[in-house]
Structures are given as C-alpha cells and as structure tokens.
Amino acid sequence: MSAIAGAVHVDGRAMPATTLARIAAAAAPRGFDGRSIWHAGPAGLIRFHHATTPEAVGERQPLTGASGAVIAFDGRLDNRADLLGLLGAPGQALRDAPDATLALALFERRGEDFLQALVGDWALTIWQPHAQRLLCARSPMGWRPFLWTFDGRTFGFATEPRALIVGLGLDRRLNEAAIGEMIAARFMTHDETVWAQIQRLGQGAALRLERGRVAHWQWHVGPFADHRRLSEADHVDRFNALFDQALSATMRSNTGVGAHLSGGLDSSSVVARLTELHRAGQVDRQIGAISARFPGEAQDETRWSSAVEAHCGIAARIVGREAYDLDAAGRWCAETLQLPLRPSLTDGTTAGIRAQQAAGERVLLTGEGGDEWLGGGLGHLPDMLLRGDLLGLLREALGQFPAEPRYRRLQRTAFRALAPIVSPAYRAKFLTPALVFDTPMPEWIRPEWAARIGLAQRWHDTKPPFAPHGFAQKQRYAVFAHARRYVGYEPLLAFAEAHGVEMRHPFHDLRLTTFLMGASGPMLRHKGERKYLLREAMRGTLPEAVRQRQDKALFLNSTVDVLADYFRRRPPRTMTLARLGWIDGDRIDALFAPAKAWRDSGSTTPLGTTRLAPLWFVVAMDLWLDHAIGV
C-alpha cells in the first residue's frame, strides 16, 4: 500500500511545484519507498510509495496512460486475471504490470464504468488533461481512506488529514455535528469528517471535478443475488471456494505475511485454512501466525490459539500487552491529526505490528469482518412474512430460539417478523444493528448543544448510500455502509502504515461479501447458532474445540485502566468537552462508575450494560481537541 495526495486549481492557474511540495512534506509518515510528484497545468498528483506486492516493487506513479490520463492509485487489486481478460489481447503485455497500470488501462478502455470491474482495497484519482476532469473513487469496503476539500478555487485530496490541513494551510475549524455523532457512539454520516472543511469520499462512492463543480455518486449499488434456494451443501461449497480465493489474493506480497491468531473462530479460520492451502501448493508461503498472550487474565486465549497451532503443526510468534501512554497518544494526535488509538489495540495488536516491522514484513491479515458478515441477523424473517412463507416462519420459530418454550418461540418469531414491517421506529433499529439506539439522546450529551447542532435530526435524516431489496439485504448492507468504521479503524490503519505494515481483511473480500449479501438467513444463524456457515465450512480445518467455540474474549481491562488514568488526570467536569458545553461531566462520572468498580474488584464477569465505547470516544475526542486543535 501507499498513500496519495494532490490538488487542482479550477480557475486555470498553473499548479506551483511549491504547493505540491508543501502537501507532500505535511503528510503523516507513509510511503517507505519514497515519493513522486507529477504536475502539469492546473493539476498535480503525489504518490507515496510503499510496495506490498511483487508487481509494485519499483513501480512509478503517478502514471500517465496512452490517452494522456494520469492516475494516482493507492491500494491493491485482487482480481488481476479477470482484469487482464477484460483488456483482451493488449492485456497480455501487462501480465506483470503494477495494479495501477491495469486500472488505468481499463479506464482508458471502458471509461468510468471500469470501477465496477475492480476487486480489492483501493482509492484512486485520475486526471484527464484534455477534458480538465478529475475522477476520484473508493472501493466498496473503504479500507483505503480518501479525504478532500474544495473552496471554489482549489480542490485538494489526500489519504491523511494532515496533508490537507497543514499542506494547504486550512483553518482548523471543527464540524461539531460530526463530533456529536462520535461522542454519542452513533456515528452514521458517511461523507463528513470532524473537520469543517474536509469531506470524506464514502465507501463505494465516486466524485467528478469538472468545470469548477463537484458531482458525487454511489457507484457500488449491487446487485446482490438471492441465494436462499441453494442447499446447505451448495452454500458451504460456494463459501469455501470464495474464502479460498480471498485468502489467496490477500497472500500476494513481496515480503513475508503475518496474521493475527487470537484463538477466535475468525482469525483461526484464516490461519488454519491458509496453512492447508500452502500445503496443497495453492499459496506460495506459510502464513506467519502472531498471538497475544495474557497469562492469568480473563481475556487470555492461549488455550484456543495453542489448539490451532497444534492442529496445524505451526508455532506462532508470541507478543504481549504494550502499556498505553496517554502522553504518547497526545503526541500522536498532534503529529498526525488522527484520533488516538483505542486502548484495546495495545493488547497485542500494536506489538504485533512492531514485530512485523522488525522482521521486515509488510502485510498483516486479520479476521476482521467475520462477526459482521457471518454472525447472522434475523432480517430474513420479515422477508418470509412478506412472501407469505408461513411454513418457513414456523420452521424458524421452532429452531432459532431453542432455549425458549414453544409458545415463546412462536411469539418471538412473530414479533421479529412483523415489527420491522409495521413499526418505523423498530425498523430503523432493526436496519442499523451496529448502532446503540436505546435512548432518544445519550444522557451525557448536553441537550442544548445537541439541539444547536441538530444531532437528533441528523440521525433521523441520514440514510444509507444505497438500499438493497428486502430486509435481510438491507440489514447486511449496514456492514458495507458502516460509518463508525471511519472513526474506529482509520487511526489503526494510519498506525500500521506508519510502521510499514498494510492490514488486509479476507472476510471483507468483495466477491465473498457479495455472496453473503444473498446467502440464506438460516445458513448464517441456524437454530440460534451464529456463524453456522463458517463453522460448517471449517469442519476438519479447525480443531473441534475452536470450531464449536461459542464465547468470545472481551478486551476491556486496558480500556477501563486508560479511562481511569485519564479521569484521574482530568476529572470529567474539567474536560475540554465539558468546558465547551458539549458533555455533562457528572453523567460521564456516573457512566464510568460501574466499570471502575468492576475493575477494582478484579471480577472476570462481563460488564453488562456498562457502555465503554462512548466513554472512550469522549476521552479520544478530548485528547484530540487538546493536541490536534489546541482549544
């Protein structure tokens, strides 16, 4: 991976090399293989090089095509064979070409529709000098950031916020409404950031800059086939083929490849299946497992990860916890303008990334996405009712809630099938499963501030970028369009890239997720069991103890400890957010009290209804305001 940036003067002024040099110098650390700057006329593009595939070694970007179009491409294409086929005979000469070359060649052949053919993690921009037109686009999962700003005269874009804020000399003005969504832990907006002047290009979205105007559209809108009539065996076979394809694609690297091995079902599936693929000669190297160990603590998963190691005949690299340094977190915010990393990431993730950097490895695979795509919702129940499939509903009633008496199974199934259809409020909650909507307005948010920024209205008015057919697909599309991913993962991606490591997520492969969008509901959640399809697909691949595991480790200790440390330094009443009138410090104290008592007691039982996510977002924003903004 890498990073990109650039600018265009829409009034026709020539783009000075000094402007591009400022943008490049302001960018946060990325691009360990150097950087290149191209400019001509009113436009300039910047590429920060970081080769993570064999084809990318020594590549030169920005790249000019036969038509004169110039591309800056940040990312990885996972369907190169398909793209070469679409290019026809000329594609044979590009068999070993970098991904950016394939993307530009396909654009010159098919125009903007070429986006539909690309599979992988990417963000790109293409400047057409003759038409004076700039195209910017982002892949459907949105794992490669793309930010932009436009003041009517200069359009700027970058992977990192610092390149725009510092490089273009923007005022550090805040978007309070977006901040409100964040500290409420109800982040829904796809195209706004916490900066007033900076927009985000959403997942699967594109924009065109032409004649001084910006036009947006959602290019990724399906369609998603309905696979509910497939048999169980066909579901498993299809999943296995697509999962193997995703794993093989994400193993394409010019260095060794590591993978998280927590002992959970998702990361264990990645490591165990890749080990099988290597031994079968289908991938060219053994995956390097990285496990975090916490002896004697509730979240220690040594039992499970060791079982995977023994089953596969491999030995994982062992890492431990890194102490969370609030002062270092503040310096990170000041130096990168990113939000601070979540404390739970110091429970092995940051240490694993540093271990890879020390070993010269540039690629890290994760099990991220398994919970979201394979956990299984109940969106298929109202679909059944609307189709008049009463027999199917009866089967679901007798199977999905096995712990309940028969009359309760019928009641719960009837309610879950009918309520999304007849109740707008329940439907909104049903279709946004990743959000917490248990109260009209979180009690720690000052009501007068919430009213001033129109917070409740934003939640009411914000719609997903695309609405598929049927409740099940709408519910699953919330994973594609998961806006909270921006605030949750972009700091981690920036941290990994700053250490020379690209994170890849096989469960988020576009071909696999497109299939899962249409998979049968009972195959994802079968007789109350989540991840049924994955468990069936991993028979023989995983040790049975891991394959049938139903619990999941919760990494809460570090978060509670960091919150307690921050509140000792700065009691909630004195926080910047409280001083600005955005939060109620007493409410924050009350919200944290059960978590503190739980930690002080040494209990290993779950925290129950205590909400740590909003507490962390409040602290993260307070840190960010103090160090990135200085308010």
Image (spheres, rainbow, N blue to C red):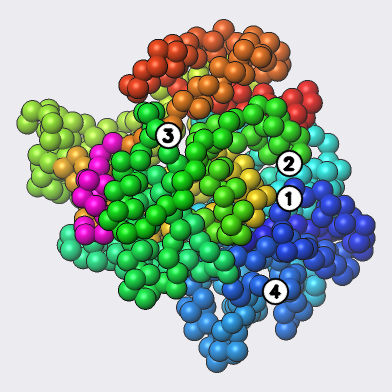
Q: Is residue 134 visible?
A: no
Along the line of sight, the residue nearer the viewer: 519 or 242: 242
The mark nearer the N terminus, 3 or 1, is 1
Per the rendering, the mark at residue 336 is 2
Q: Is residue 53 visible?
A: yes
Kindly report the distance in space between the C-alpha atoms of the residues bearing marks 3 and 2.
31 Å
Query: Is label 3 or label 4 in front?
Result: 3
Circle 2: residue type: Thr
| Quarter occupied by residue 38 | bottom right
- Is residue 114 rendered to the left or right of residue 408? right
Q: Residue 47: x, y in percent?
A: 74, 63
Would you name the residue on which mark 1 appears? Answer: 29
Q: Residue 449: x, y in percent?
A: 64, 18
Kindly report the distance in space between the C-alpha atoms of the residues bearing marks 2 and 4.
27 Å
Residue 174 in the image: above or below residue 79? above
The mark nearer the N terminus, 1 or 4, is 1
Per the rendering, the mark at residue 59 is 4
Describe the element under mark 2 as helix, strand or loop: helix
Residues shaded magenta: 539-551
Direction left: furthest residue: 406
Q: Are marks 3 and 1 in contact (CB under 8 Å)?
A: no
The mark nearer the N terminus, 2 or 4, is 4
Would you name the residue on which mark 3 appears? Answer: 294
